[in-house]
Amino acid sequence: MTTRVALIDDHESVRLGLEAACARAQKTVVFSGANVAQYLEWRRRSNSSPADVVVLDLTLGDGTTITENVRRLVGNGSSVLIHSVADRPAGVREALVAGAAGVISKSSPIDEVISAVATVARGEALNNVEWASAVEGDRAFADAQLSVREREVLRLYAAGLPLKMVADRLGVAYSTAKENITRVRVKYVEVGRPAPTKVDLLRRAMEDGIVSQSAGDAGDG
C-alpha cells in the first residue's frame, strides 16, 4: 500500500524538495502547506482520511507551539515525523513528549529522510542520532524510575517476547509480569511519556537504554 504523506513546513523550498523525493520513492504527497491549521482545513473540506505520516517542521512561523502542533496531528490520526535542524534538542524533546514518532535532521541526506518516513509509516520505532541527542543529558525526560524487576520485564517484552514467555523466563506468574508492565506504563505516563502500545514500550526502552536497536529488531511479539 502506498504511504500517504503530508508535508508541513513554512519554507516552500523545503516542501518542494520533499515532494520530489517522495514522488521518486512512490509515496503519495496528499498535502503540502505552511501550517497545521491549513492541513486540518484541507482534511475538513476534502473529507480525506488522515495522512499516514506528517513530516512536520519543528517551529512554524504562525505562533503555534510544538506541543500544540504535534498533539493536533496525532489526535487527528497521523504519525508525526519531526524534520528539523539538529541543534534544537529541547524542542525535539517537547515534540517527543507530545507524541511525535521520531525526528530526522534537515541536514540528513534525502534518502535517509524518506527511509525515516517509511519506518514511521510501518509503526516502527525510529532510533537514530537525532533521537539519542534529544534525550541525552536530560534525565528528567529519560528516567521513569523503573525498578530492577520492571526493567527486566520491559526488556524482554519490548524486545519481542510474548508476556507469557517473559513470565516463564523470569520464573514469575503471568499475573505478576502483567502487573509489572501495567506499572511501567503508569510510570511513563507520570513523566509525560505515555506508552499505550507495545511499539511505544519498545521506543521508551530504547530511549532509556534498556534494549538496543538490534534487540528491538529481534521480534515483534
Image (spheres, grey):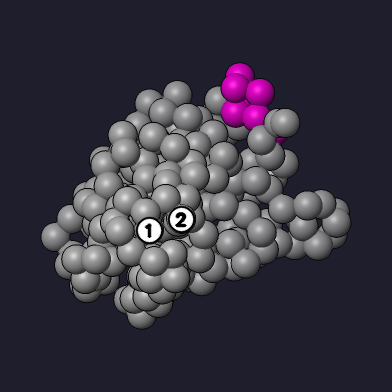
- Can residue 210 be seen in this snapshot? yes
At x 65%, y 46%, the residue is: 52
Label pair 2/1, CB-CB below 8 angstroms: yes
Residue 207 can be seen, yes or no: no
Query: What residue would you read off at disc 1?
Result: 167
| The quarter of the displayed image where residue 205 is located | bottom left
Q: Disc 2 and disc 1: Cα gap in Å?
A: 5 Å
| Residue at the extreme top of the image, as rendered | 24
- Residue at image coords 31%, 38%: 215
Q: Is 122 inside the magenta-drawn segment?
A: no
The amino acid sitting under disc 2 is: Lys
Q: Which residue is mark 2?
A: 164
Q: Picture coordinates of residue 19 (x, y %)?
A: 60, 32
Classify mark 1: residues with Cα within 10 Å, few (<14), some (14-19) or many (20+). many
Residue 180: where, in percent of width, then height?
A: 36, 70
Which of 102 and 181 lies nearest the eye of the viewer? Answer: 181
Name the secondary structure under disc 2: helix
Q: Which of the labelled discs sits on residue 103, or is there none? A: none
Residue 131: x and y, percent?
30, 48
Q: Quadrant of residue 40?
A: bottom right
Residue pictured at 77% horizontal, 57% vertical: 43
* Numbered range of the magenta stretch: 22-29
Of residue 122 and residue 169, the one placed in the foreground of this image is: 169
Instruction: Name the residue rendered at 59%, 46% in the picture.
Output: 53
**Side (left or right) of 132 relative to 55:** left
